Image (tube, helix red, strand yellow):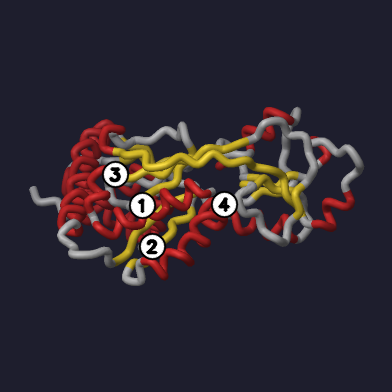
Amino acid sequence: MHIPWDAVQLVLAVADTGSLSRAAKRLQVTQPTVSRRLAELEAQLGEPLFVREVSGARLTAFGERFVEPARRMADASAEVERVAAGAERGPRGTVRISAPPGLAAQVLAPFAAGLHGQLPDVQLEVIATTRYVDLLRGEADLALRLAGTAVRERRRDLVVLASLQHAVAAYAAPAYAKRLPRGATAADIAWIAWPPSLAHLPPNPQLAARIPEFRPAFTSDDFLVQLRAAEAGVGAVILSALAPPRTLAKLALELGPLTATHQLVAARGALVVPRVAEVAQRLTAALAKL
């Protein structure tokens, strides 16, 4: 039985995201297209791969068996592409870097400005996302990840190139900061944070540990929306102190020791590609300066 590679990729997208609609977004097709193609594949196999539920899609026992070799196929496909790219005579092409939205804006955007002058034939593509990005499968070439974040890749195939420990602090619009009472504590702040579906991401757990019955005043799953809400005076947002927006003022709050450590990670095989190696070297140096 021949199973097209794009059908395998579809199954992996649904398995990874847990939803047909999120898989459609990743594959850049419509949700009905994903549903139709998945139904066609299941009919060809004679077995259901997923149990459809209100909350999403869950692998069946057969689906679990199917996905295990499918992941190995995806890893091998990405490795073939990296070997082919390693034949480049010089750094040329696109390098994709994933990072949390805050660091993407505060660190990678300024880094891109200097990189263009150093490597004019290399284009930087920044994937600003809170979701897991699989490096071995080639979803990105490099990743800035929160240290300690659980990853599915085999650790022996990953290389940690640099670590960046940085302070974080509360920032708000100057007008909002002036309205706060003298000696305001964390409990007095209208916090801007992640919604319940992303409540495991910093700073929600850290704020919840410091504020009894913590409940954000405003939530969004989009970092830029959070930032805009802070600029509009809705409340305060926790940001890295590396390069805070000039439109916001740092609040004099006693939050205790609040730091974050991110690591620059790459798949070992990706570093043989000249453009990836060059960007990784320069980003490592830039992080060291920070």
Real-space Cα distance between discs 3 and 2?
A: 31 Å
Secondary structure of the residue carrying numbered label 2: loop
Asked if residue 46 is positioned above or below residue 211 in the image, the reply reads below
**Nearest to viewer (mark 2 / mark 1):** 1
Label for residue 267?
3
- Label pair 4/1, CB-CB below 8 angstroms: no
| Earlier residue among tags 2 and 4 | 2
**Nearest to viewer (mark 3 / mark 1):** 1
Q: Amino acid at mark 4?
A: Gly
Q: Quadrant of residue 49?
A: top left
- Label pair 4/3, CB-CB below 8 angstroms: no
Q: Position of residue 60 (x, y in %)?
A: 30, 34
**Nearest to viewer (mark 4 / mark 1):** 1
| Earlier residue among tags 3 and 1 | 3
What residue is disc 4 on? 102
What residue is disc 1 on? 281
| Earlier residue among tags 2 and 1 | 2
Q: Quadrant of residue 207?
A: top right
| Earlier residue among tags 4 and 3 | 4
Real-space Cα distance between discs 2 and 1?
A: 38 Å
